[in-house]
Image (cartoon, rainbow, N blue to C red):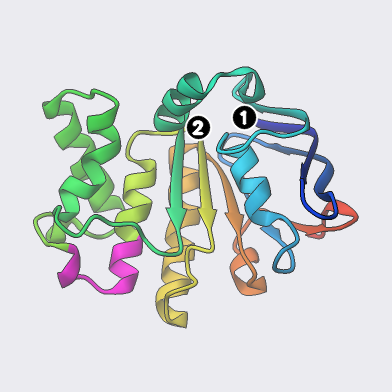
């Protein structure tokens, strides 16, 4: 589903800094992997390259056979909206929309008809255990519940790839464990390729495979 080949990225400055070099990775449909590494090593840069938010200096990123590095900005925006889902540490749940409206956003942006949208939103809310909170506003939810909303929103449009960037960083240990189990379950059930970026060994342990990003490159450690 996702294939990275020899990715490299440098940033100009007083000293031209190479952040990533020779990064290759394959993630299959329904496969859930974790990427760990020290702060500043390039995890966010790698995530941005995969998401098409930044361009590599060399190498390629292919999603379901499409070379993302060959797309212009407009085409990349459309692909990202249709084929990717994102879960962030800060939730990014819109405070003026209900739970159901937040989850429906990707479907609305992709032009899904209202009747079909309602069915898919209801199904996803049930899957993440929030069926009873469809009309609730974000201010009425706990942090763990808001992250469940974010997971539902990331998966409701059935993306090919889900990118989770430190999704439990703002949660207590019990809520974090529940969210990580739910994220893995949803990735598996939806057949989505999933990548978890994390500092936490406990979080990474929920993945099928663990990779360590270092100055030496990206290496599988489990």
Left or right position of 209 against 81: right
The outermost residue toward the front is: 14
* Few, some or many residues within 10 Å of mark 2 (<14, 14–19, 20+): many
x and y, in percent, of residue 124 in the image: 28, 46
Q: Residue furthest right?
A: 216
Location of residue 57 with respect to 32 vertically, above or below: above
Looking at this view, is 212 or 174 the one in front? 212
The x, y position of residue 176, in whole percent, is 45, 73
Residue at left 44%, top 53%? 87
Q: Is residue 150 above or below residue 70?
A: below
Magenta span: 138-147
Characterize the magenta stretch by its predominant secondary structure.
helix
Quadrant of the image occupied by residue 58: top right
The circle on residue 1 is 1
Q: Residue at x 68, y 47 (%)?
A: 46
Can residue 143 be found in the magenta stretch?
yes
Tag 1 and tag 2, C-beta contact below 8 Å: yes
Residue at x 32%, y 72% (from the top left corner):
143
The answer to whether residue 34 is visible is: no
Above or below residue 116? Residue 47 is below
Q: Position of residue 78 (x, y in %)?
A: 42, 24
Describe residue 58's horizontal placement relative to residue 69 as left or right: right
Residues under labels 1 and 2: Cα distance?
A: 7 Å
Q: Which residue is mark 2?
A: 160
């Amino acid at each position: 589903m996702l294939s990275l080949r020899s990715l490299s990225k440098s940033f100009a400055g007083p000293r031209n800094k190479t952040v990533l070099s020779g990064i290759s990775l394959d993630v299959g449909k329904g496969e859930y992997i974790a990427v760990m590494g020290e702060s500043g090593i390039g995890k966010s840069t790698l995530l941005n390259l995969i998401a098409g938010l930044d361009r590599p200096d060399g190498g390629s990123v292919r999603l379901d056979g499409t070379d993302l590095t060959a797309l212009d900005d407009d085409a990349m925006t459309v692909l990202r909206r249709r084929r990717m889902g994102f879960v962030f540490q800060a939730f990014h749940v819109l405070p003026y929309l209900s739970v159901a409206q937040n989850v429906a956003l990707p479907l609305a942006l992709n032009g899904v008809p209202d009747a079909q949208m309602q069915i898919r939103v209801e199904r996803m809310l049930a899957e993440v255990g929030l069926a009873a909170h469809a009309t609730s506003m974000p201010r009425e939810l706990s942090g763990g519940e808001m992250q469940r909303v974010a997971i539902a929103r990331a998966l409701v449009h059935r993306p090919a790839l889900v990118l989770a960037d430190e999704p439990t960083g703002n949660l207590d240990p019990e809520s974090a464990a529940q969210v990580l189990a739910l994220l893995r379950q949803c990735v598996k059930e939806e057949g989505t390729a999933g990548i978890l970026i994390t500092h936490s060994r406990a979080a990474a342990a929920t993945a099928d495979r663990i990779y360590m990003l270092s100055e030496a490159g990206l290496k599988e450690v489990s």
